[in-house]
Amino acid sequence: MNQIIKINTNERGEVNVSARELYDALEVRKSYRFNQWFDTNAKQLIEDEDYTSVDVTTEVKNNGGTQLRKLQDYTLTVDAAKQIAMMSGTEKGKQVRMYFIEVEKQWNSPELMLSRSLQYANSKLIGYESQIAELTPKAEMHDVFIEKGQAIGIREASKELNVKQNNLIDNLMNNGYVYRTKGHHGKLQPIKKYVPKYFVLKSASVNGVEFTPQMLITPQGREFFYKKFYEPDQIEMAL
């Protein structure tokens, strides 16, 4: 199945889509501006049930470089997206609606249901391992990074740095190292120039449906951010 529009998943395992990406997929740009198009279609939807307003940050090219730009977007449930596609009354709208129907079939297949169960069990296991790690005396941070020797997720990284996860995320976003993708509970993604030095991306696709890659922080990245945000006066560590 060809991917017409990216399907996102939030922390609760629910699927959703970006209104801006749906707008592009329906190819109505020539007829409506995005805000006009969404205001018209939102009349048949219920806010905080069918859609949620979100601010997203995206990279745009500017004078040979890139900069971050904030945009207004909305997270849509798949049912809401299907309804908008159907109401468009176009052949493209029909194709998009049928694509969502096929995605839902695959999402509810026994294979994917089992996959989600395994992912949940794995996340619980990581949580238990993190609790055990907190009870174990730690060596110097540099030794921990070297011993770990692998890229890990933001939750594990915050545990390793002994800081709150939201605090680490805020520092990374406010200092221009990462941004959030479109959609409710959008996933963190790194700025391209910091890949693969500080971050790597772990891609995932099931039955031809590609999901937003998971961002992992490298040992070098964790050491760098630890010194930058939490121990700025620390003696320079050899990288």
Image (cartoon, rainbow, N blue to C red):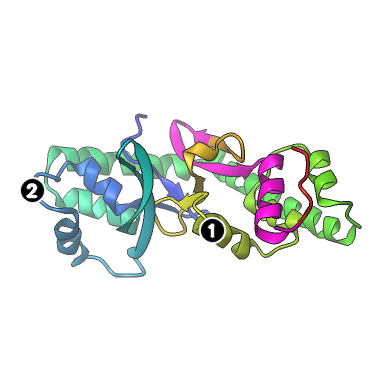
Q: Nearer the viewer, residue 90 or 67?
A: 67
**Image position of 26 (left or right of 52):** left
Image x and y of residue 107, in percent: 46, 43
Q: Nearer the viewer, mark 1 or mark 2?
A: 2
The amino acid type, in three-letter code, at marker 2 is Ser
Q: Nearer the viewer, residue 222 or 151?
A: 222
| Magenta residue check for 211 | yes
Q: Residue at x 78, y 39 (%)?
A: 238
The image quadrant of residue 42 is: bottom left
Q: Residue at x 18, y 67 (%)?
A: 43
The quadrant the C terminus occupies is top right
Q: Residue at x 80, y 53 (%)?
A: 129
Q: Which residues, given as a range, are shown in magenta?
A: 204-233
Image x and y of residue 234, in percent: 77, 55
Counting residues from the N terminus, which is met first, the one under dot 1 or under dot 2?
Answer: 1
The residue under label 1 is 12
Q: Which mark is residue 81?
A: none
Give the CA distance from mark 1 to mark 2.
Answer: 36 Å
Q: Nearer the viewer, residue 113 or 31?
A: 31
The quadrant the N terminus occupies is top left
| Magenta residue check for 42 | no
Q: Residue at x 50, y 59 (%)?
A: 174
**Image position of 141 (left or right of 108):** right
Element class at badge 1? loop
Image x and y of residue 202, in percent: 57, 36
The residue under label 2 is 31
The amino acid type, in three-letter code, at marker 1 is Arg
Q: Residue furthest left?
A: 31
Q: Is residue 77 above or below residue 111?
A: below
Element class at badge 2? loop
